[in-house]
């Protein structure tokens, strides 16, 4: 491996900021584990789930960047997607890393986390268990998929060759596990019909969540690749970006049809105008996270990488609104109960996500995310 | 409404994966032996709100009284990690009623279905029990319970889920639940579910003027082990309308259909896509 030809640069100021945030976040996380949820969160019997769970169910489809790009590249045989496989896998890996870190903070009895892996304890009726098992297994798959990027730097060839030989099996397994848990995230809410606001509760919630992971994953990959290549001073393949935009645009349109069709079928369209805060959140997702990116992609703007990039950003914002509602705001509590996240919940989350971004940036600078030999094909 | 939609989805599901779904129907809910499981019957017309049931519950389970910041005793406002049963008063337009809240010990409990690690279990005798040694503290049970019964020890470093145990440890030696045994008026009785249902129906038949013509828990949420008779409408006492289908039904059926479909179909589809891509590659 030769490609890292960048000369030593001084460390940018943003790295220090991210580093500082990470240290604060990790420190607060340790404090939370030491003193419990009472002093560090505003969760209560009426709001047992809050910001942390919402962020987890948001980050999982964003981390879908890895399995979507991997599927298109390895199984659909699209060479151009192969070129962005490494940043996509790294995004996925760090996304799941952040998910696990935040989940550990949220678990009241985190010291018994291993329970989810002990066969006599596993309850397969629980979609949360399915998600937990999948995330554990998939993280291992991602480590294998990521390993060559890291190991090649020191010319450790044997494991790289083994992984490359088994890559179809490894990535196939990853795609399968992802399909299962991305839909299971939605299925977790099937049993909450009495609790989740009807604008979000639907029997097709697993399908909606899986579709979100598909367009969210590809959109996240587009955003990450553009940012990375810009920062590294690499050129962008215009045509490929337009293709990516079209792809997640079509999936986004499919999502819109499912969602509106479901509301129509359930006779719930009226709720879009009569549910106060909930109506507002639904419209925010529809306009910012679906309508706006669709307009961008299928207009002149979508013919340029910067347009696809911004469409991707809005898709992720829409995903954020949807998952925040599904995992927290939409789970209705008695009217007199309130929950606003404690500052420790907020800052620890920011710190963990900053840590993931920092690790990405460091790897992007020191390892080769865009191997040259892939371009020559 | 949503029922129609559910049926629509069910039909669609049956069309595709009927064979996978059907065995589950028999597995769901308590089935025939539900009648022999332990249950309680609470009758609002007999309750005088004297609250020894609350104290007996705390005594037996070693739960401290809830006090105000100065350390003086104050009656709890709602269920909590230290208060597993609670008598509340409903009063409106001259009509009043006491109501007792605690775990309903559903026949097919949502909390048991969602618990990832089987920390919550439905015992053969009837109670829904909790094992802190398995629990990871995810609180999915708290979200899933339609009666908002499970509570959490928010102030503990390593908190546990807390709720009524139906005095499972007393049942083991042949005693009844502590709350039922101290009730001086017979408002709380306990016994086999089938017998209590017969008794409840008899009371409704003997005194149709005294009661709302409904036994809450007979079929609600697929049936519960705590049954209620009331002289005021149940929604006034905080009982949700849940239908007669067990809560876990839709979710467990979906799992039974979706998982095998993806596990078997997924690899086939992936292999097919790969094959077609290769064909195309060779042609091109």
Image (cartoon, helix red, strand yellow):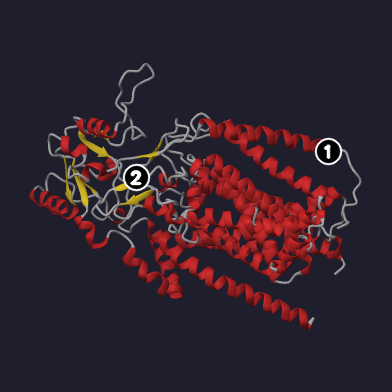
Q: Residue B229: where, in percent of width, then height? A: 19, 46
Asked which secondary structure carries label 2, the reply is loop
Residue of label 1: A12
Of residues A345 and B228, which is closer to you in this image? A345
Q: Chain of mark 2?
A: B
Circles 2, 1 touching at the beta carbon (< 8 Å): no
Residue of label 2: B147
Circle count: 2
Estimate the spatial distance between the alpha carbons at disc 2 and disc 1, rounded to whole Å.
54 Å
Residue A52 is left or right of residue B283, and the answer is left
Of residues B258 and A336, which is closer to you in this image? B258
Which quarter of the figure has residue B49?
Answer: top left
Q: In the image, is residue B265 above or below residue B183? A: below
- Dot 2 alpha-carbon crowd within 10 angstroms: few under 14, some 14 to 19, many 20 or more: some
Name the residue at the bottom extreme: B283
Which quarter of the figure has residue B180?
Answer: top left
- Dot 1 alpha-carbon crowd within 10 angstroms: few under 14, some 14 to 19, many 20 or more: few
Q: Residue B78: where, in percent of width, then height? A: 33, 33
Asked which secondary structure carries label 1, the reply is loop
Of residues B63 and B151, which is closer to you in this image? B63
Q: In the image, is residue B17 above or below residue A22? A: below
Residue A292 at least partly seen: yes
Residue A364 is left or right of residue A195, and the answer is right
Residue under disc 2 on the same chain as residue under disc 1: no
Of residues A259 and A84, which is closer to you in this image? A84
Look at 52% across and 60% down and name the residue there: A206
């Amino acid at each position: 491996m030769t490609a890292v030809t960048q000369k030593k640069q001084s460390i940018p100021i943003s790295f220090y900021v991210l580093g500082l945030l990470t240290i604060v976040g990790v420190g607060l996380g340790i404090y939370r584990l030491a003193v419990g949820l009472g002093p560090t969160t505003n969760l209560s019997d009426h709001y047992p789930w809050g910001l942390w769970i919402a962020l987890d169910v948001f980050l999982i489809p964003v981390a879908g960047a890895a399995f979507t790009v991997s599927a298109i590249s390895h199984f659909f045989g699209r060479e151009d997607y192969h070129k962005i496989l490494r940043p996509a896998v790294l995004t996925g890996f760090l996304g799941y890393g952040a998910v696990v870190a935040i989940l550990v903070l949220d678990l009241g009895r985190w010291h018994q986390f291993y329970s989810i892996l002990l066969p006599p304890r596993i309850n397969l009726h629980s979609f949360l268990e399915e998600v937990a098992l999948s995330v554990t297994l998939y993280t291992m798959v991602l480590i294998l998929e990521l390993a060559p990027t890291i190991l090649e730097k020191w010319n450790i060839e044997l494991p790289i060759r083994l992984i490359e030989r088994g890559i179809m099996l490894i990535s196939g397994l990853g795609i399968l596990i992802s399909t299962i848990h991305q839909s299971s995230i939605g299925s977790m809410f099937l049993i909450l019909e009495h609790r989740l606001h009807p604008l979000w509760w639907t029997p097709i919630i697993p399908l909606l969540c899986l579709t979100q992971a598909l367009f969210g994953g590809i959109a996240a990959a587009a955003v990450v690749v553009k940012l990375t290549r810009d920062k590294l001073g690499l050129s962008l393949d215009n045509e490929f970006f337009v293709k990516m935009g079209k792809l997640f645009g079509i999936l986004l349109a499919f999502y819109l049809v499912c969602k509106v069709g479901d509301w129509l079928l359930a006779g719930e369209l009226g709720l879009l105008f009569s549910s106060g805060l909930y109506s507002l959140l639904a419209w925010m997702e529809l306009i910012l996270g679906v309508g706006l990116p669709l307009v961008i992609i299928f207009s002149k703007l979508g013919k340029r990488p910067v347009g696809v990039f911004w469409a991707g950003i809005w898709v992720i914002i829409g995903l954020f609104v949807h998952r925040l509602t599904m995992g927290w705001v939409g789970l209705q509590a008695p009217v007199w109960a309130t929950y606003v996240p404690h500052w420790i919940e907020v800052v620890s989350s920011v710190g963990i996500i900053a840590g993931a971004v920092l690790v990405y940036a460091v790897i992007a600078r020191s390892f080769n995310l865009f191997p040259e030999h892939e371009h020559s094909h | 409404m949503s029922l129609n939609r559910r049926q629509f989805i069910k039909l669609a599901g049956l069309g595709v994966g009927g064979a996978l779904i059907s065995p589950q129907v028999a597995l769901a809910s308590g089935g025939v032996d539900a009648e022999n499981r332990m249950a309680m019957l609470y009758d609002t017309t007999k309750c005088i709100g004297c609250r020894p049931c609350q104290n007996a519950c705390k005594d037996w389970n070693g739960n401290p009284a809830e006090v105000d910041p100065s350390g003086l005793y104050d009656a709890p406002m709602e269920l909590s990690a230290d208060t597993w049963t609670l008598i509340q008063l409903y009063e409106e337009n001259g009509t009043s009623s006491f109501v007792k809240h605690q775990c309903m010990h559903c026949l097919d409990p949502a909390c048991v279905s969602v618990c990832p690690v089987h920390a919550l279990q439905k015992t053969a005798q009837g109670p829904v029990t909790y094992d802190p040694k398995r629990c990871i503290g995810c609180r999915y049970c708290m979200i899933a319970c339609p009666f908002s019964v499970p509570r959490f020890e928010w102030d503990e470093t390593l908190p546990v889920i807390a709720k009524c145990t139906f005095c499972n440890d007393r049942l083991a030696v042949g005693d009844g639940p502590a709350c039922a045994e101290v009730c001086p008026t017979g408002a709380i009785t306990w016994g086999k579910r089938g017998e209590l249902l017969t008794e409840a129906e008899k009371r409704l038949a003997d005194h149709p003027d005294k009661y709302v013509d409904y036994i809450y828990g007979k079929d609600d949420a697929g049936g519960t082990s705590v049954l209620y008779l009331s002289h005021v409408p149940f929604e006034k006492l905080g009982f949700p309308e849940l239908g007669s289908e067990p809560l876990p039904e839709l979710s467990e059926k979906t799992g039974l259909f979706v998982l095998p479909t993806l596990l078997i179909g997924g690899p086939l589809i992936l292999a097919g896509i790969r094959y077609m891509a290769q064909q195309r590659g060779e042609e091109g």
